[in-house]
Image: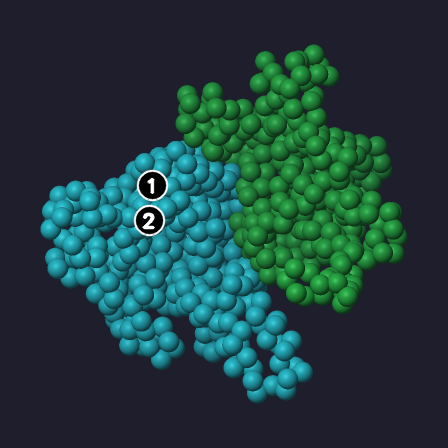
Chain colours: A cyan, B green
Amino acid sequence: MLTKVTPRSDLLMFVLFTLAILAMPLWLAPIGAGYPDLLQKFAIFGLFALGFNILFGLTGYLSFGHAVFLGVGSYAAVWSFKLLGMNPLPALLFSVVFSALFALAIGFISLRRSGIYFSILTLAFAQMSYNLAYSVLTPITNGETGLRVLQSDPRLLDGSGSDTGPLISRLFGIEMTGYSGFYFCAVLLIVGFYISQRIFRSPFGMMLRAVKSNQNRMSYTGLNTRPYTLAAFVISGVFAGVAGGLLAVTDPLAGAERMQWTASGEVVLMTILGGAGTLLGPILGAGLIKYFENIFSAYNEQTLHAIFSFLPDVIEAPVVSIAGLFVGEGWHLTLGLLFMVVVIFLPGGIMEGLNRISKIFSRSKPKPKFTSSSQSAAAAE
Amino acid sequence: MDAIVLQILNGLDKGGAYALIALGLTLIFGTLGVVNFAHGALFMLGAFCAVAFNHVISLEQVVVDPTKITAWGTPLETRTPYIEVWLGDTGTTLLNYSVPLSILLAVPLMLLFGYVMERGLIRHFYKRPHAEQILVTFGLAIVLQEIVKSYFGANPIPQAAPDVVRGAMDLGTLIGFDPGTIVYPQWRIVYLFFSLGIIGSVFAFLQFTTFGMVVRAGMADRETVGFLGINIERRFTLVFAIAAMVAGLAGVMYTPILPPDYHMGMDFLVLSFVVVVVGGMGSLPGAVSAGFLLGILQSFASMNEVKTILPGIDQIIIYLVAVIILLVRPRGLMGRKGVMET
């Protein structure tokens, strides 16, 4: 978007971003997305994708098991609720600590390989965690039922038994649902965006980009790239952990299905759709996918009939039945198609599309772009 | 001792399925250099070929007999499959053998599908990075499984094996154990031999035909084969179709063991990838032996004796093996030196 990167333009971008996020209830209301539950999802999954982008967008390592950290973050937060009480701050601290530990362990092993082997290793770890959470670890994860906070839990800080109302996370008396919940998530998203922006502009970020474009050359210059990639992996794991913690804060329960590899695939899709390696892309992608998921899965036969009622009956019936495949239960079909279309035609995601459009309009010859496809091509070499 | 033999047998049929899928994956990877995340979906499509075939041949003719009234007060309906009406006893036999017969449907269908998929999609991804290949085939897998879901529903659809092989067989008596110790479902034995047969024919095809020779040469050094004036891409298209067919056949014959549902492909895909990695990327014998090996390992891990020592091991054993293999011997059990080692 911004062709020239200066501290000033960065600051401008950050301020605009902050304003846009905080004003989301206002400018999203006309398209029917201005209600808190969905806004919370935007912020949480935006944070998740933002973190994933630090790993995939900068280093080019495609992790197919990133949802593990989301799940771990959720479980850690719910355990903090159970043990310490419903305050979200210790819960998020728990999420950060545990997701960082998991990321450190998984990253330490997985990063010894690159390319497709790395993807398979992370996938293997994710599947292991998922399977264990469902079976042996049931005392910790409560298996298929999912972990939830009970009235009988100790909750040392708010004291058990005294609270008889519904168990909602409270930040010093403010209930973490509705708009206050959204603003809590939004603040964390903005903090996350700031961190991610600083990483993108730092020498550390440059190093990660260098790893992506040519890891061999980095090694030949005598540099050990492992600590850098591991740091990126842990940071991105912590982002995912905080996102998982926030999921638990807004709705205090955690389930193993958050760790399934389809969930990992979803965050990959968000990042790719928005544009891997760009700052805003992943958040945009996450927002779009959650928005369309919400819109499309709400459609059913009746609404479709209402939409296409202007057509003559002969045409309407087949149109409705075909469109019916893509909405409601069939939303995943749309998602899959969208995924393929983006990867085939626009591997740089929406941000690349926007760039192309702005190039057409500006006519001035911009500097050769460092597109993500050429970057990852180099990384795979 | 008998318990060990039983576990080995138990692992073999699952191992057969892993081996067949992994064989196709390796073929595709070795020839085209493409990581096909949609291969599990091909397995699933094969299984649903059997379901569709069964649906078609068991279409029923409904005869309403108004003179007789059922207990519910409605006229008596007699339902007979058309195929029985037309062909009599032959029809009944055909119906009974619907699973093996659906191979006849699956072979051309999967070949065609593989061909179309390679020409229409995969071809454009040869030069793209592996990450993008993974992503686009992953998207295709989602699309395929959602289409299947919308037509066949989300519930598993059980398929029956032919009556002859429906029961269990006391294998133990054949090899000198006490009767009743090693009882094994007959269909699984059929599946084992079927998968061995398919594996054998794929290997024979690659080893003893000119086409296979060219393909092997192409796997070893694609460029040189191209310089010799051979259109290697055309052959690779066919290889892709064959790999799709192998996965499809594995799916067809697996239906009596596991009632097919729309996400079975994904479940098998992850495991098959692990199998390929353990066997060694691009090594066909590696894929096959790792398939059987991991199948057997998994069935050993689900023994109660093992589970009491290491709880939960049955859930993770395959992944654990993959992690260890990748760290200790990155090229896999039988991978060639220098092929995809990093």
Residue drawn at x 32%, y 36% as measured from the top left: A139
**Can residue A175 be seen from the camera position used here?**
yes
Q: Which residue is mark 1?
A: A141
Residue closer to the observer: B92 or A187: B92
The chain containing the residue under callout 2 comes to A
Q: Quadrant of residue B81?
A: bottom right
At 45% from the left edge and 25% from the top edge, which residue is drawn? B307
Residue B184 placement, left or right of A73: right
Q: In x, y percent, where is residue B236?
A: 74, 46
Q: Which chain is home to disc 1? A: A
Q: Is residue A250 above or below residue B100?
A: below
Per the rendering, the mark at residue A254 is: 2
Q: Amino acid at mark 2?
A: Ala
Q: Earlier in the sequence, mark 1 or mark 2?
A: 1
Tag 1, which secondary structure?
helix
Q: Quadrant of the N terminus of chain A?
A: bottom left
Q: CA distance from mark 1 to mark 2?
A: 8 Å
- Give the structural element (helix, strand or loop) at label 2: strand
Q: Residue at x 31, y 46 (%)?
A: A147
User: Front-most of A157 and B30?
Assistant: A157
Quadrant of image for the C terminus of chain A: top right
